[in-house]
Image: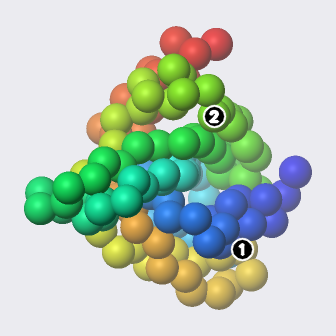
């Protein structure tokens, strides 16, 4: 599996939230754990802002472990009971990332070691 799979997931047209250990630069070697939470929004949802009348929930979670220029998918889960155990990072903002081909791309997300550690604990409990 190459970094092309994570590139494809990051470029899906569905709204997503990215939670990473460090800056997402898929064109450079380095160690990073990247979670991609696919967002399912109800009608009337305001993207997580307090004034929104709808709700926002996660429909699928991916995890990619990246090292030495390669990203391996370590998790893909869409079971609602399991997906609901992942906290939604409401503090996510526009985040510049770089895909494996060097192309800049903008997603919603955060770089947060505590969130990643929490997600790692959730993953251990899912297995």
Q: Earlier in the sequence, mark 2 or mark 1?
A: 2
Q: State whether residue 67 is above or below residue 23.
A: above
The structure residue drawn at horizontal position 71% and vertical position 74%, both measured from the top left corner, is: 100
Q: Residue furthest left?
A: 51
Q: State whether residue 96 is above or below residue 38.
A: below
Can you tell which mark lies on residue 78?
2
Q: Residue furthest bottom?
A: 103
| Colouring rule applied to residues | rainbow
Mark 2 or mark 1, whichever is nearer to me: 2
The structure residue drawn at horizontal position 30% and vertical position 38%, both measured from the top left corner, is: 114
The structure residue drawn at horizontal position 63% and vertical position 34%, both measured from the top left corner, is: 78
Q: Quadrant of residue 73?
A: top right
Residue 12 as seen in the image, left or right of residue 110 = right
CA gap between label 2 and label 1 equals: 25 Å
Q: Locate the C terminus by quadrant.
A: top right
The percent position of residue 43, horizontal first and vertical second, equals 37, 59
Secondary element at tag 1: loop
Q: Return the residue nearer the eye: 86 or 21.
A: 86
Q: Return the residue nearer the eye: 31 or 107.
A: 107
Residue 90 as seen in the image, left or right of residue 39 = left
The residue tagged 1 is 100
The percent position of residue 23, horizontal first and vertical second, equals 45, 65
């Amino acid at each position: 599996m190459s970094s092309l799979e994570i590139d494809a997931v990051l470029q899906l047209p569905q709204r997503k939230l990215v939670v990473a250990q460090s800056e997402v630069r898929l064109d450079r070697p380095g160690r990073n754990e990247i979670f991609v939470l696919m967002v399912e929004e109800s009608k009337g949802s305001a993207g997580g802002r307090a004034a929104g009348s709808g709700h926002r929930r996660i429909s699928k979670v991916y995890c990619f472990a990246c090292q030495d220029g390669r990203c391996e998918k370590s998790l893909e889960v869409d079971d609602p009971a399991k997906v609901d155990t992942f906290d939604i990072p409401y503090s996510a903002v526009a985040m510049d990332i770089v895909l494996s081909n060097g192309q800049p791309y903008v997603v919603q997300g955060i770089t947060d070691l505590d969130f990643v550690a929490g997600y790692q604990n959730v993953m251990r409990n899912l297995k």
